[in-house]
Amino acid sequence: MNDLVFLSSQQVDAEPFTTGDVIAKYAGIERDSVNKLIRTYKSDLIDFGELRFTDSKTLNSGGGRPRKIWYLNKNQANLLITYLDNTKPVRQFKKALVRQFDAMQRELIERRAQFELGKQFSKSLHATIADSQIKMHGHEYSTFNRLIYKQALGVDSTKLRKARDIPKGEAITTYLSSDEAEAVRLVKNRVEVLLDVGMDYQQIKRALQIKGVVYKVTLQLPVKN
């Protein structure tokens, strides 16, 4: 039961959710029974937020009769499972679901904290680069930024943005896990220190490479046609 809770997006303001199908599968209940329960107590569930769903036809191009896949936020899911019978599989599922919602919420809180901290480090780094004697025809920060991501995560910011489908103009940091954000922050701090002692770009690059990648990530890059 490691895949009970999902995120509405990869951004730091994402909302954790589960689905009626997940509840049915892991609680050992017929999907139609869970969906009927959701419809029966719909007015209760919408007290805790919009009750969203996806038409399965949009998820499966293989045909078949379309059906609704209900999305439930933490409070909605916790309320719904109180309406289930307390069989042993249901009790085991309830405990696992609560734990995963809590774990996901903790991760999001940490990601948001890292995001706010990262903004402060970025502002300080911008100022340090501006005060340095390094000139790259107006591309100083973008060049350092690519280096920072390469040394923090093992992939430059351009590839990371492409792999995670991050819209142009949106900050990459809103799409990082807490561990990834911490690695980027650590390398930004190192770069700022090295700039302060008067190193140029190539010297800084060599110094970072000696340290090695902080937190290696594996990206599934889009396949080129």
Image: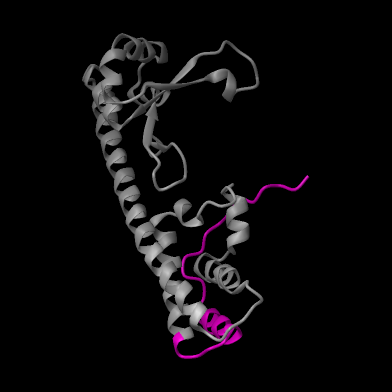
Q: Is residue 195 above or below residue 222?
A: below
Pick whichever, 175 or 30, lies toward us.
175
Verify whether residue 137 appears in magenta. Answer: no
To which quarter of the image does residue 79 belong?
A: top left
Identify the image quadrant of the C terminus.
top right
Q: In the picture, which quadrant includes the N terminus?
A: top left
- Which residue is at the front of the view, 90 or 217? 217
Determine whether, in the image, residue 220 is placed left or right of residue 179: right
Whether 142 is drawn above or below 78: the answer is below
Image location of residue 59, percent across then percent down:
57, 25
From the image, give the main secondary structure of the stretch colored magenta: loop
Instruction: Say which residue appears at 56% left-offset and 71% top-offset.
Output: 141
Coloring applied to the structure: one colour
* Residue at (64, 51) in percent of width and height: 221
Q: Where residue 189 appears, x then y in whole percent?
A: 41, 75
Q: Could you say which quadrant of the image residue 125 lies in?
A: bottom left
Q: Position of residue 202 (x, y in %)?
A: 61, 84
- Where is residue 122 shown, x and y percent of the image? 44, 67
- Tell whether position 212 is magenta: yes
Please tell me which residue is depicted at 57% across the width and 72% down the height of the picture.
Answer: 147
Residue 147 vertical position relative to residue 30 in the rendered view, above or below? below
Q: Is residue 62 visible?
A: yes
User: Can you see residue 211?
Assistant: no
The vertical placement of 172 against 92, above or below, is below
The extreme bottom residue here reads 198
Q: How many marks?
A: 0
Spot the residue most to the right.
225
- The segment highlighted magenta reads 196-225
Q: Image check: 59 left or right of 88?
A: right
Q: Is residue 155 left or right of residue 41?
A: right
